[in-house]
Amino acid sequence: MPVNSRREQGKDAAVQGTNDSSVVSKVSAAAQGYFHDDFLKHFVCKVSRRAPLINRGYYVRWKAVDHCLKQFFHATQSCSRRQILSLGAGFDSLYFRLHAEGALGGVTVFEVDFPEVARRKAALINSNTCLKDMLPDRETVSNQQTNAVFIRSGHYNLIGVDVRKEQEVEVTLSGAGLQWDAPTLVLSEVVLTYMETQWSDAVIGWAAKLLPQSVFVMYEQIHPDDPFGRVMQNHFLKLNSTIHALKQYPDTVAQTQRFIQKGWEKCVCLDMNQFYFDLLLEDERQRVEGLEPFDEFEEWNQKCSHYFILTASKGSVTNQALLTLAKVSSIPHMTPQWTERPPLVIQPMCGSPSIEAVGMASAVLAPGIILLTGGCGRSGRDTAARVLIKEKDGWKCACVDAHGDKVVSLYQTLTSIPGGGAVLFGGRTSPLNPTDSVVCVTFDPGNEQSQSAVQLSFRNMVCTGTGPKPRWRHTSTLICYKDKTFLFVFGGRTEK
Ligand SMILES: C[S@@+](CC[C@H](N)C(=O)[O-])C[C@H]1O[C@@H](n2cnc3c(N)ncnc32)[C@H](O)[C@@H]1O
């Protein structure tokens, strides 16, 4: 596929748009205190607040890249000339924040992006006192139509060129002063995946060939074939910015092999759960986890399993900049050690309707009738409860209006009552809005011929005494004691 076809140009414009959305998300995470960056805000028109899950996603991405940068600085501290080559840099503020932190230590930064993006970035820098004051020796290149170097200065160079055009990149970078034999960190933060894999493979190959003392740092997506992976791919497809590499390189092992095959000597690739749980220090995790109300743990875990951070090195100096898991894993060994056959056999429900959501509650109302309430699926929350009814040829699902708010919440418990029915307790709409309501669910099974005519009724129960605090993610069990039946509620999370 030629790089310059009209169809490709349309796609390139959409890919350039991904920069605008990622910089807004980074600004949101910085504004909530996930990381410190005083410069990103100069690259957006308006500061927007993203959801906590998005903020955490951008935090872990930022933190992983920052970790690799600091490791590179440490490994190369005795070298007189060091460089960062950021491919598809977009509106990244890397140079400005590292310079302000005093962490740059004479490293020269080369940022490359499409000419359209580099032109916009150069205009933003040139019109902002705070940014341009940090580049006192800058030369602004006047004819940006014909010259690919848009800003040139002692330690910062902004270049507008398509990284798929290897020869153009090589000539322009040489002209801008990149020294190919100096220790160099090549950064690709969610960039190469937007080009067809033949191109991204070529970029990984030319970087290995041209930079004999370097470390390649890459952050992008993996695991295309599970439900989360499919939704993730569709999201980018709708934006006309398809993500490509994960089809051919679907996991961390495939990505590692890819880099070795393309000429890199060593490679370490971690998914973001490994990075977050095994590499970050406990104190840092606690700091981050206290920033915003948050309990979407399953989604967080899933999200982290769909992104990776990779370091690949060439040459002896940069070997030391590879990622290492020095810390002993804090995740306990979860594989059950069966002494005999497992006591539980999981069987798919024949003809079962597909219901996919997190935070649902379920209980058996009567033999062959299961009630499901609450939860949040891919299309959001559903106020209807669902009843699964076992019929001769499989399971049938019926939606039941349950008067909205009683079942709209997440992470409530539903406990079967002997003789039929169930008790619903707790749950939350948001982490700031848990409930302590106790709802009795009774049902009328309808006539024998048509169980699908099940009628449910939801009734708030009035409780005496001091009940448990509003909570979610707890457990509930019925306990009979001295002729009385108690709902025993244990654990979970409360607002505090
Ligand atoms: C998702 S943004 C990431 C920006 C930045 N790396 C960050 O993480 O904040 C992807 C960037 O890659 C750039 N890009 C994609 N393909 C490119 C190519 N072939 N040549 C140059 N830049 C490219 C886009 O223009 C865009 O700025």
Image (cartoon, rainbow, N blue to C red):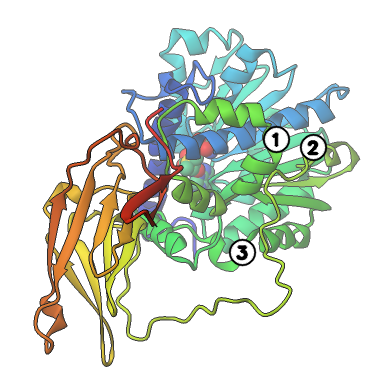
Q: Position of residue 281 (x, y in %)?
A: 68, 31
Q: Quadrant of the C terminus?
A: top left
Between residues 403 and 241, which one lies in front from this camera angle?
Answer: 403
In space, the residues marked 3 and 2 are separated at their CA atoms by 23 Å
Q: Where 382 sits versus 37, above or below?
A: below
Residue bearing mark 3: 249
In the picture, the disc for residue 68 is 1
Disc 1 under 8 Å from ligand 1? The reply is no
Q: Are marks 1 and 2 in contact (CB under 8 Å)?
A: yes
- Kindly state the secondary structure of the residue where label 1 is placed: helix
Q: Earlier in the sequence, mark 3 or mark 2?
A: 3
Residue bearing mark 2: 321
Quarter occupied by residue 198: bottom right
- Kindly state the secondary structure of the residue where label 3 is placed: loop
Which residue does the image show at 88% across and 22% down from the upper left? 78
Quarter occupied by residue 373: bottom left
In the shown orientation, is residue 417 left or right of residue 15?
left
Quarter occupied by residue 41: top left
In space, the residues marked 1 and 2 are separated at their CA atoms by 7 Å
Q: Earlier in the sequence, mark 1 or mark 2?
A: 1
Which residue does the image show at 60% across and 43% down from the upper left? 188
Q: Earlier in the sequence, mark 1 or mark 3?
A: 1
Q: Position of residue 417 (x, y in %)?
A: 28, 63
Amino acid type of the residue tagged 1 in the rendering: Cys
